Image (tube, rainbow, N blue to C red):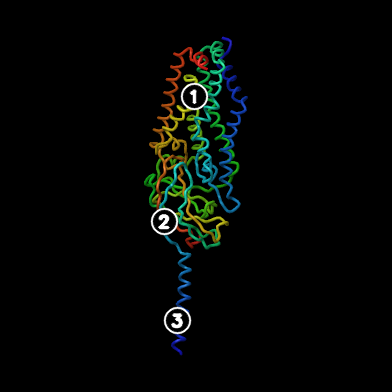
Amino acid sequence: MKSTKKISLLLVVIVVLSMALSFSAFAAEDNFPYSFTMKKNCANNYCGDSRYRDSDKTNNPWMVNMTYNAEGTSAIAIYWLASSGITRTQYSDVVNVICGNGKYYKGVYNNAYHKNTDLGVRNNNNVATAYVVSGYWDEETGTLL
Amino acid sequence: MPYSIMEWYMYSVIRIFNDKRKLFLIIIIVSVMLFDIFYKIKNIPVGGMPYNANLSVFLAFTGIGPNFHALVFWMLPISLLFIVSDDIFEDFSTGNDIVQITKIGKKKYIKTMLIKGFTISFAIIFVSLMINLIVSHILLYGVTKTFESDLFKFGSLAEVCLRKPLLTNIVFIFVASILSGTIGMTGSSMALAFGDRKKVYIASFLIWYIFFIPRKSIMLSIQPFSEYNLSDILPVYIACIATHILVTIVCVIWRTKNDDLSYKNQIVD
């Protein structure tokens, strides 16, 4: 009887711990790989791999790290956090990201609480050529700004 | 001489502004540049913050709204041709050019039309970009936000641009306006030489797209605060201006050699 109590207690502890760990993992910084086309003529394009942002803080930043840009070894692209779906809402200010320059963090607007988010990209030059961009991003990093 | 070039020039300028369709197009160009700055500040209520006034100008191209930049610059030859050289086609069809040439002489007529083509195209783009710059400075007064990226690593041009942002903007406004002026002048010269709307519009569009389509596009040369250096943007800018001037010279020589162009046109019509 005692042992069953102990086992059930252990189980409860394990479940609670795993839940706590999973929550902390949810808010921690991840590196989700992305690779998509930065469209020509400065049309906006989106990653398409939408992620749920469970935060209600504007200073819980999203992150982008562009590691490859076909335009050049250190070319600039404009990134922002957008809503997922057909009609896109802008959820954050834009970031001018230099390729291979490390991670960029940015806060969000107050309309981005508990929403499905997507990564938007646009070339910072108005040119008629499309380029492929790739790297890593995260919709919420947990490290408050 | 009954008329001086100046009088004739003023007459042709007033003629442009008396035409409501051309005036409408000029107003559209000015308002597109104004919409651009309004669109950049639209996210302020939900917590957004645009870049400072110098980085938010039309030419810097930092927003992600509708591509207003494209509305003006992709079709630049078409809109400029319509504004500055449409009266040349009108003159061809009505025979008014013969009247004008008889009054002031052929060389003066051609000269006036070229000067008008350059100055009006220059002025339209220059004034609308300056209005955009001034409105940007008024609306974004006190905003200090700058680029997240350290553009200094790109070398000389980006460094100079960021150290003197206002001067950079004014220089690039001149660069864009001179480009527009040259396109307007070439459009006028082709209008004088061919006298046919279809040919002129297609030809000027073709010349523009030769420089617009490549990776090192002419668009890069009119954008301040970009990652490109002078070695990238200067060759294409010079090549574009030189080609336009070359076409202008050929067209002027062609028009001077062919006296009865307008007369032939009327017979065909």
- Mark 3, other Cα within 10 Å: few <14 / some 14–19 / many ≥20: few
Identify the residue under disc 3.
Answer: A10
Q: Position of residue B1 (x, y in %)?
A: 56, 9
Snapshot quadrant of residue B123: top right
Seen at 44% across and 38% down, the residue is: B220
Question: How many C-alpha atoms fall within 10 Å of the one at disc 2: few (<14), some, or many (≥20)?
Answer: some
Residue at image coords 60%, 22%: B15
Element on which disc 2 rests:
strand
Picture quarter containing residue B8?
Answer: top right
| Amino acid at circle 3 | Leu
**How many numbered marks does the figure carry?**
3
Q: How crowded is mark 1: few (under 14 residues within 10 Å), some or many (20 or more)?
A: many
Residue B121 at x, y percent in the picture:
53, 28
Expressed as whole percent of the image width and height from the top left, the position of residue A21 reads 45, 71
Secondary element at tag 1: helix
Q: Are marks 3 and 2 in contact (CB under 8 Å)?
A: no
Q: Residue B185 carries which label?
A: 1
As helix, strand or loop, the secondary structure at mark 3 comes to helix
The chain holding disc 1 is B
Chain letter of mark 3 equals A
Q: Which mark is residue A136?
A: 2
